Image (cartoon, rainbow, N blue to C red):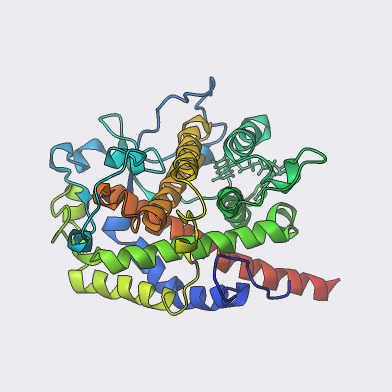
Amino acid sequence: SPDYCLQIITPTCNTTFSYIDTINAEIRPVLLKLMHTSFFKYFKLDLDKQCKFWNAQHFCATKNCAVETLPEEQYNWSEVHDEFRPSKLGEIKHKSASLEAPATCEDLDYSHIDEGHDCVFVDLLANPERFTGYGGAQSFDVWQAIYSENCFPNTNPMSMAAGSEPEQCVEKNLFYRLISGMHASIAVHLSNEYLDPATETFGPNLKVFMERVGKFNDRLANIYFNYALVSQAIVKLGDLVAVADYIKGETGPSKHSELLDNDSTSLPEYTEMVSQITNSLSIEPLFESHLLFDPSAVGPELKNEFRSRFRNVSAIMDCVGCDRCRMWGKLQTIGYGTALKVLFELEDPETQHLLKFRRIELVALFNTFDRLSKSVASINNFKAMYLEHLEDV
Ligand code: FAD
């Protein structure tokens, strides 16, 4: 497809497909290396949490749906100190919170995070996001619930009632693009690691990719849109938090569990990797979040509604009937939720004094960015496969 402006919220249109492709090719190796470190490869979740919306069954139809969890003795609950506050926020003089502002730091969360003793730890690298066989009415119902009940009305071009006007509000449309981009990114991963029943191996399947994503310009564009949004959150958080110091315990959890005690990556190595990524991402502002939820144009209710709708989407992840899909769905909704919290709350004088982040939010944010980065790399690979296929016919 021709290179075109992604219509992302930027005053000038510097954000194009090819610009993101170039940046992504540059940072992909270092991001991959970072995701292999002890800090980023472990994720905590409750796999048995009940779906609170309908009677969903948690059963895996195939072994590809299963999640391999880590033995309990490897993590130590009593030593989990996993909260941090952006240190530089302490320098800002805060106004006192208004009545409309959320009252506690949890009220600022855009996603649900599993807590308690039913949680397990998983090694993400041992449980890749790929084709699982989950589908049919079960998965359709989950996506349907997300689009029809949780996105704002008239933002989904596919399901708009005849005669209704498309939604003009940028923030409401952003919500739909975010969900559609997450859905499309999941479809890229399952097409890129699709099961070949003949050989029982996983590999790229061009036909599946074209049917689910490649033929739809809007779905492709929404993946790049999410890339711009999440990368901007990483840059913004990096401006306020010495991420590597937190990882190595200078400001964060030094002895979190055996999982982190065995971390062989040093502080200078973490610092180098994180700054290589943030330096490349900050050459051009990819996403101007300060133009959204502008108090002179919209009231505080819109942001509160946006937050509670997204939180609901994250709770729907408990209704996903395949463990592996549920795990990656939870990780990505926490990752996007953290990105939204960074972009929309960090500079809001009404709420920033309440802000706190948890270790798991940092893990989810970077892993979600890695999912998008891998999607962009896979899309380029599929593009090359498609061109080759055209030459053959
Ligand atoms: P679906 O992907 O189920 O889509 C349903 C309908 O939504 C489509 O008919 C179309 O009208 C619309 N639609 C599709 N894509 C978009 C888009 N990007 N934007 C807007 N509208 C769209 N399966 C795996 O194999 N591995 C996984 O890791 C995995 N993770 C999942 C995580 C979650 C949270 C969920 C809900 C499902 C997951 N699935 C996974 C299942 C997968 O997403 C599909 O639902 C399944 O493969 C069936 O696909 P489908 O082609 O029938 O359409």
When the figure is inspected, residue 329 is found, relative to residue 347, above or below; the finding is above
Instruction: Point out residue 213 in the picture as x, y percentages from the top left corner.
Output: 69, 56
Q: How many marks?
A: 0
Instruction: Point out residue 315 in the picture as x, y percentages from the top left corner.
Output: 46, 34
Q: Is residue 60 left or right of residue 345?
A: right
When the figure is inspected, residue 68 is found, relative to residue 16, above or below; the finding is above
Q: Residue at x 16, y 54 (%)?
A: 261
Q: Quadrant of the C terminus?
A: bottom right
Give residue 110's quadrant in the image: top left
Name the residue nearer the viewer: 156 or 41.
156
Query: Would residue 362 be seen by someone viewing this image from the given angle?
Result: yes
Name the residue nearer the viewer: 89 or 236.
89
Instruction: Point out residue 226 in the picture as x, y percentages from the top left corner.
Output: 53, 59
Query: Would residue 127 be seen by someone viewing this image from the given angle?
Result: no
Ligand 1 shows up in the quarter that is: top right
Instruction: Point out residue 388 in the picture as x, y percentages from the top left corner.
Output: 75, 74
Give residue 101's quadrant in the image: top left
Q: Quadrant of the N terminus?
A: bottom right
Name the residue nearer the viewer: 138 or 305.
305
Name the residue nearer the viewer: 94 or 126.
94
Give residue 41's quadrant in the image: bottom left
Outermost right residue: 393
Q: Is residue 239 left or right of residue 52?
A: left
Q: Is residue 305 left or right of residue 152?
A: left
Q: Residue at x 44, y 62 (%)?
A: 290
Outermost front residue: 296
Q: Residue at x 44, y 45 (%)?
A: 300
